[in-house]
Amino acid sequence: MKYNHLPITIVLIFISGQECNIRAHCESEFYLFSSKYNLICSGIGNLPSEELHSYFNNGYQLNSIHISNSILKRIPTNFFHQFDQVQEINLNHCEIDMLEANCFMGLQQLQKLFLNNNNISTIDGEVFSFLVDVSVVDLSENVLETIDKTAFKNLFNLEELFLNGNKLEVIPDELFSATRKIRHIDLSRNSLKMLSNGIFSNLTELLTLNLDNNELEELASDLFKDLSKLERLSMSSNALKRISYESLLGLENIKYFDISNNEIITLDYECNFSVGAIEHNISFEKLPNLTDSCCNKTDEEVLMVGLLLRLNNLEELHLEENNISEIRSESLRGLTKLKRLFLSNNCLHVIHTSAFEDLSSLELLELDNNNLQSINTTTFNKLWKLKSLQLNNNRLHSLPVSVFRDLEQLNDLSIANNLLTYIPHGLLSPLQHLKYFNISNNHLTQLNMAWFHTAGPLFSLDVSNNNINSLDGEKLVKLLPNFEIIYLKGNFWSCDKLFNIIGVFETANVEVRKGDNLDTENINGIKCTTTTSLRIFNNNQSNSIDGTYGLQKLANVLLNLSDKLDNSNNLMKKIINIVGLDLTKYNGVNLSNRGATSGLQHTTTVNMDTNKFTGSKQTLQGILNNSKITIKLLEDAVQEEKIRYPNLDTIRTQSVHSEDRVTEITSANDVGKTYALIFLGLAFAVMAIMFAYKHFQAKKRNFIIDGIRHIRFQQQSRSNIDLMPKDEIEVVNSRK
């Protein structure tokens, strides 16, 4: 037991005898019921041993010296000669760059030596000559480039050696010849390019060997032949291209084997590793290719590990981050004790029907981030003990109804980020212990309560980021008595429905996880809308709308369509109640008919972001009669600009395509001016025509009236003459 930290301040003297103004801080740490104590210092500069002796010659036994964050630079010869009873020296972070010969002379009882995190570049043959009892030497995180082959010749009791984090390119053949008791060697994070045959000879007590993060390209034959007790061998992040049978001879008791992140091309089949005693973990992360040259296999991306290695006692297998595209029926044959299998981040698109049938002890299976488009009905057969299945980030369009029939113990199922539009009735029926179900980021348009009829133990359900617009919360709560958490964000909720759904769950003490959408209409961060809208998204198929029946009744309905919307036949003409129209991220939108949008009488938002718009300038005329409408025609989000036009707020790009040519949507101001000029011209023309017509009609009417008057006058004149006496007629004629 330790107690009584006694702080002291000392003025130090350089070895040259000159006074130093560096103030060192030291503490003494005493042991209860013992005469031993530890010295802990920092801020030391070239501390001479005489000073240490004079300050602590107090009748107590110095057990250990810890000096850190100092500037010692070098350890001179006989530096510690007066501290013969010290058992541990720790000189980390002291900027030491030189260890002089016999600098540790006199430390006959030293057991642990820590020189990590310094600037040591060379270890000479006489540095550790007198450390016959030392069991731990830590030289990690230095800049070591060379170690004399006789440097460890007297370290007969060495058990742990740390040389990681240096610049070693070569290890001398005889470096470990005297260290017969060594149990742990760490050579990771160096620049080793090769290890000569016999370098580990006679290390029969070695348990762990770490060679990670070097530049090894090949392994010598019989390299590990004497390591009969080795349990952990790690060689990840090297440049290994091939591992032969001979190079791994002697590893009968290996339990952990990691050759991840290499450049393995061939794992010999008939020349298999014969390491049947592997019991715990093997990692092959980032193996670009796995083939069987002895059997003339040519597919370098086919997983053949089980067949090649015969790891019958393996419990954990890591194959993440490779380019494996296929798992054959024989790939994992015989791994009856395997409990955890990691196959995420590969290129898997095929899993043979019986690939997992021998994995009767499997509890965890990760198949995330692959290219699986379908799964066979029998793929997961006989996985009776499986508890967690991860199928996230694949391209699954559907699942067979009986695909989970043997997974009675499954409690965690995640199928997020796929292309599922529907869950078949009965899919979850065998999963009597399912607690966590994640089906987020798919294309579900509904959440059918019949799916959960037998899912009583379900605790958490994630249906976020789908296209669901309704949910019977009351029925779901009745079906799931253990239900406590649900995720609803990123769906197509109306605010009224969402408010009611959240209320039902809160009453039943079911937590609705909050969303993060606070910039638009939302309830607890879950986006919702108070308007009627139509949203059409890309589901990677190639179909078209070919009828209007389904569209005529749209209200808050999310329509699941294709990547090419063809409305050339006026299919939207009767969608008069749609307020928002979302056509984002399509490969093409065809609205070529001028009347294609004529039925969108109440639409205020049209979003065709990231499209190659096909149509003419007249296409949008059908919705220009609204009081205000926003149209978004962004292609690949290249360039945005807003321009105002009476009754129209348009966002467009430079790339708006027609069927045969690029169609430019002209400036709204220019359009306004054009329409104004046309209107004025037409008005003037109509007025001129009307004026001319009225003038013509008036003139014609006056001409007719004058003619009628003239005729009547002539007729009247003749009548008067007939009635007049002849003498009066003569008078009239004479007047004329």
Image (cartoon, rainbow, N blue to C red):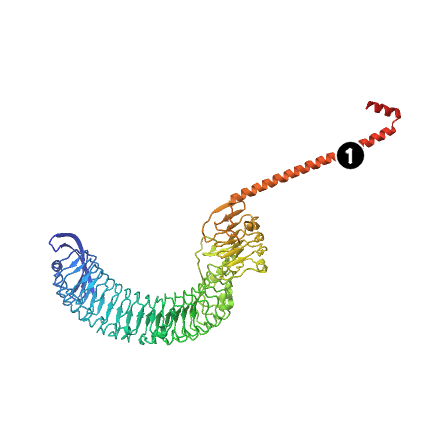
Q: In this rendering, is residue 294 above or below 617?
A: below
The image position of residue 402, as x and y in percent, is 48, 72
Q: Which residue is mark 1?
A: 708
Q: Position of residue 270 (x, y in %)?
A: 33, 76
Q: Is residue 694 left or right of residue 488?
A: right
Place of residue 411 in the rendered image (x, y in percent of width and height, measured from the top left): 42, 70
> Residue 1 at what x, y percent from top left?
20, 66
Which image quadrant is residue 143 in? bottom left
Q: Is residue 717 above or below residue 689?
A: above
What amino acid type is highlighted by mark number 1?
Answer: Ile
Q: In the rendered view, does 419 fall on the left or right side of 46?
A: right
The 10 Å Cα crowd at callout 1, few under 14, some 14 to 19, many 20 or more, is: few
- Asked if one can make out residue 65 in the rendered structure from this viewpoint, the answer is no
Q: Is residue 467 left or right of 97 when viewed as pictured? A: right
Q: Provide the secondary structure element on which disc 1 rests.
A: helix
Query: Who is closer to the viewer here, 318 or 675?
Result: 675
